[in-house]
């Protein structure tokens, strides 16, 4: 299973997040031993990690961040996290927060990428970019489809691979099992 989320910090509709907002998504077991000085950036670390874990579970239910425990650590300048059997990494800078995760032993067993662009139909555009990226990476025929639950999958050389998308304002991304 795989999950991804991206938050565009420069989205003009994005509201500022403070300690009160952070309390609304916090799970009692959440931990970040070296959080950023900025409470808003810390909020987005947890939000993106929780949403990518939610997508990893591929359940057809409402996203409720406060029921997902996240333990974040920082190693050699990079954020890594764990939530039960799910492990992931977070990239955060002034422009965006990107979280990818998997239940696989390593993210090396996935393809993932994000794109910076605006498009009229983001859903169609991310599928086009994902197909192109996977075709060029795998040198295989690729089709983006849905599984029996209506969730996205990539069919690579006739074999289904679990796939998850994210998009927020100027950014889009995907993660797919190899």
Image (cartoon, rainbow, N blue to C red):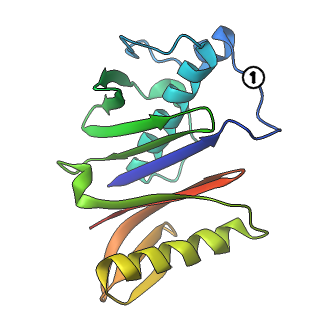
Left or right of 119 in this view: 148: left
Left or right of 5 in this view: 118: right
* Residue furthest out toward the left: 105
Instruction: Locate the C terminus and report the quarter of the image it occupies.
Output: bottom left
The quadrant where residue 161 appears: bottom left
Reply above or below: 22 against 131. Answer: above
Question: Where in the figure is residue 108, as x and y percent of width and height?
Answer: 23, 55
Q: Residues within 10 Å of mark 1 (few under 14, many from 20)?
A: few
Reply above or below: 1 against 63. Answer: below
Q: Between residues 36 and 163, which one lies in front from this camera angle?
A: 36
Residue at image x 40%, y 59%? Answer: 112
Q: Between residues 33 and 64, which one lies in front from this camera angle?
A: 33
Residue 147 visible from this viewpoint: no
The quadrant where residue 91 appears: top left
Badge 1 element: loop
Residue at image mark 1: 16
Residue 162 visible from this viewpoint: yes
Residue at image x 55%, y 33%? Answer: 93
Residue at image x 27%, y 32%? Answer: 84
Question: Where in the figure is residue 139, as x and y percent of width and height?
Answer: 31, 86
Question: Where in the figure is residue 124, as x and y percent of width and height?
Answer: 66, 74
Left or right of 65 in this view: 123: right
* Residue furthest out toward the right: 12
Residue at image x 28%, y 38%? Answer: 87
């Amino acid at each position: 299973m795989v999950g991804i989320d991206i938050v565009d910090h420069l989205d003009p509709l994005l509201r500022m997040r403070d300690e009160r907002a952070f309390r609304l998504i916090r799970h009692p077991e959440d931990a970040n031993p070296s959080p950023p000085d900025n409470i808003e950036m810390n909020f987005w670390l947890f939000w993106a990690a929780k949403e990518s874990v939610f997508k990893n579970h591929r359940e057809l239910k409402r996203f409720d961040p406060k029921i997902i425990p996240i333990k974040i650590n920082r190693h050699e300048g990079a954020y890594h996290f764990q939530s039960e059997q799910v492990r992931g990494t977070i990239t955060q800078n002034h422009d965006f927060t990107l979280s990818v995760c998997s239940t696989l032993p390593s993210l090396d067993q996935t393809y993932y990428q994000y794109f910076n662009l605006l498009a009229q139909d983001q859903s169609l555009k991310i599928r086009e970019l994902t197909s192109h990226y996977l075709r060029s990476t795998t040198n295989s025929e690729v089709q983006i489809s849905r599984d029996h639950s209506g969730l996205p999958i990539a069919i690579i050389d006739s074999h289904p691979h679990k796939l998850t998308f994210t998009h927020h304002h100027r950014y889009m991304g995907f993660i797919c099992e190899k």
